[in-house]
Amino acid sequence: MRLDGEAWQRVYAAVPLQRAGKPEHVAQTVVFLAQNDFITGAVIPVDGGESLLGAANH
């Protein structure tokens, strides 16, 4: 299924930061984790806050 511009706007509006993520956001997180040798077993969502909403809001 392809979304049109209006559908994407609804998706973005549902994300707390109200915008789309970019590959650079993931890359910045990967670099941060690669440079820090004291973080182990962490899960860092790079989702604009969407994971804070919970399953009921999806």
Image (cartoon, rainbow, N blue to C red):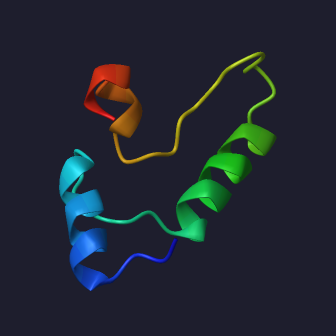
Give residue 5's quadrant in the image: bottom left
**Is 9 left, or right, of 42 in this rendering?**
left
Q: In which quarter of the view is residue 57 placed? A: top left
- Comparing 58 with 53, the one in front is 58
Where is residue 24 shown, x and y percent of the image? 58, 68
Query: In the image as oriented, which residue stretches furthest toward the bottom?
Result: 5
Q: Is residue 1 left or right of residue 37?
A: left
The residue depicted at 28 percent of the width and 64 percent of the height is 19
Q: Residue furthest front?
A: 1
Q: Is residue 57 above or below residue 10?
A: above
Q: Is residue 8 left or right of residue 44?
A: left
| Residue 22 spot, x, y in % from top left | 50, 69
Find residue 30 and report its horizontal and vertical position in percent: 71, 49
Can you say which quadrant of the picture contains the C terminus? top left
- Which of the 4 image quarters holds residue 39? top right
Residue at 48 percent of width and 77 percent of height: 2
Front-lying residue, 8 or 16: 8
Q: Residue at x 58, y 31 (%)?
A: 44
The image shows residue 25 at horizontal and vertical percentages of 53, 60
